[in-house]
Image: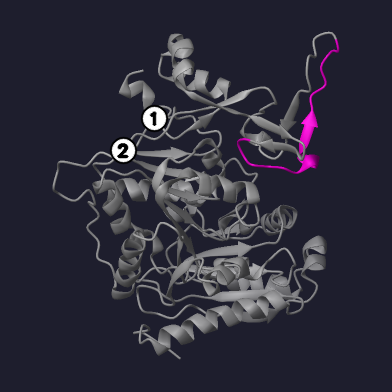
Amino acid sequence: MNRSLASLFWGRLLTEHEVKHSLQAIGQGDSYEAVIQELGAREAIVASDEGYRCGRCNNTDSHQFVRLDMPTTIQTEDLVYCLACIQMGRITKGKSLYYLPQAPAQERVKENSLLTWEGTLSAEQARGSQALIESLADTQRPHMIHAVTGAGKTEMIFPAIAHVLEAGGRVCVASPRIDVCLELAPRLQTAFKEVPVSLLYGHSEEAYTYTPLVVSTTHQLLRFAEAFDLLIVDEVDAFPYVNNSQLHFAVERAVQASGKLIYLTATPNQHLKDLVDNQQLTATVLPARYHGYPLPEPVFTWIGDWRHAIRTRNQQSELWRLLQEVLALEGVQLIFMPSIRLAEALFAWLQQSSSPYLMACVHAKDPERKVKVQALRDGAYQALITTTILERGVTFENCQVCIVGAESPLYSQAALVQMSGRVGRRPNYPTGQLIYAHGGISRAMKQARQEIQTMNAMGRKRGLLHHDQA
């Protein structure tokens, strides 16, 4: 197998169908029989006295394995498949996963830096960036950057990425959210103009090609093994990665034995904090945004029975009064709702009322989501009614946020902090309105406010808030 063909499979763990598809996508379908002989094979479903284990996602939960019903005349053995990773395509007992080890890193001859980004890091960003580079030597423990929303985490990782790429290594930046990946890919391509960048996510129409720099959803990492010298997981606390043992396994397997795993987050969960306390995870904390303004702190605003107000479309309600104030603010407004049903109901009410404000409703199931988000940026809309799908990974100029039903159990502390972090991210608009509109104050609301205040206090103590209004 020549190097060009082999590069399709370096560090990848694929089903027979995926091997065929990869070859067909580049017009090499006739090479399948020869190629499959040169790939290593692993059992797709491993059976033992303890039960089954999925070779792709490491699932061992007996309830997540299903026997495939086949006519008894042709069934020669138990055809069992794994439900835990079924969205990646079905794999069954008796089949194989095919793998080719990642090619050894090749030193670059060129002496100029691969980093073509022309920006400048703030002192705090530079501190975080240097900590990342120094952490590369410790391959036994991951490193976490705990930086407030809007601290400029993406720019911070550029020098570490350049360091690994220039040594001939391969880098992946992964996130649980497709939206975040779609924002990251063009930013990384701009920062590394001479480096090919590939973007991997479900239902992508682009054929896979080997690139030194990869942007991927965490789900797509189920198709990799010992592939990357540096793997950076952005938004490590986000759904669906958080508390998903299969995705954690995929991330850890995707890193080479001599590679480095880095986590980025503004809202580390208790598990990550415990790992830091137990010295199993090293960490750098950045409590201030790069522009030197404090994080906007939420204003708690009581709106009574807001669900009833939406259901009855009561224009005398506290919710209606507040929404008119929010929509009249300058800039763009994000109005967060706890569920798709409530978001659509509020949007329908505002539309029915002949509101003079141009707006749209977006959620995870909306096929026009990307178009609507861009339309808000372009000024075609003034506001978006949204679910938590826009809680992270997006930045808007002069953004105001109102979280309706902030006491809802569907909003975690982390989600509230992330939604709050959409306000004041740009240096030309470093402040803004942040409203927790509620029918009763929840524990998560108080915890989110405390987290924001704690970070501001830490930034103030370190002298990082140059435009402090406290």
Please state which amino acid type lies under the numbered disc 1.
Thr
Dot 1 lies on which element?
loop
Q: Residue at x 53, y 83 (%)?
A: 454
Q: Quadrant of the N terminus?
A: top left
Query: Which numbered marker is on residue 323?
Result: none
* Magenta residues (range): 55-72
Q: Residue lying at the far front in this picture: please name it.
A: 49
Q: Is residue 391 above or below residue 109?
A: below
Q: Quadrant of the C terminus?
A: bottom left
Q: Is residue 70 magenta?
A: yes
Q: Give the mark nearest the N terminus, 1 or 2.
A: 2
Colouring mode (rainbow / by chain / secondary structure / one colour): one colour
Coordinates of residue 187 in the picture (x, y in percent): 35, 51
Instruction: Examine the image and state in which quarter residue 450 appears.
Output: bottom right
Q: CA distance from mark 1 to mark 2?
A: 10 Å
Q: Is residue 377 left or right of residue 320?
A: left
Proximity of marks 1 and 2: CB atoms separated by less than 8 Å = yes
- Observer-nearest of 226 and 363: 226
Coordinates of residue 380 in the picture (x, y in percent): 48, 52
Query: What secondary structure is the stretch in magenta mostly built from?
Result: loop
Instruction: Examine the image and state in which quarter residue 65 appears.
Output: top right
Coordinates of residue 439 in the picture (x, y in percent): 76, 76
Coordinates of residue 77 in the picture (x, y in percent): 78, 19
Q: Is residue 321 left or right of residue 222?
A: right
For label 2, the crowd category at 10 Å Cα-Cα, with few meaning under 14, some 14 to 19 and many 20 or more, is: some
User: In this rendering, does residue 272 appear at all?
Assistant: yes
Query: Which numbered marker is on residue 196?
Result: 2
Please state which amino acid type lies under the numbered disc 2.
Pro
Query: Which numbered marker is on residue 209?
Result: 1
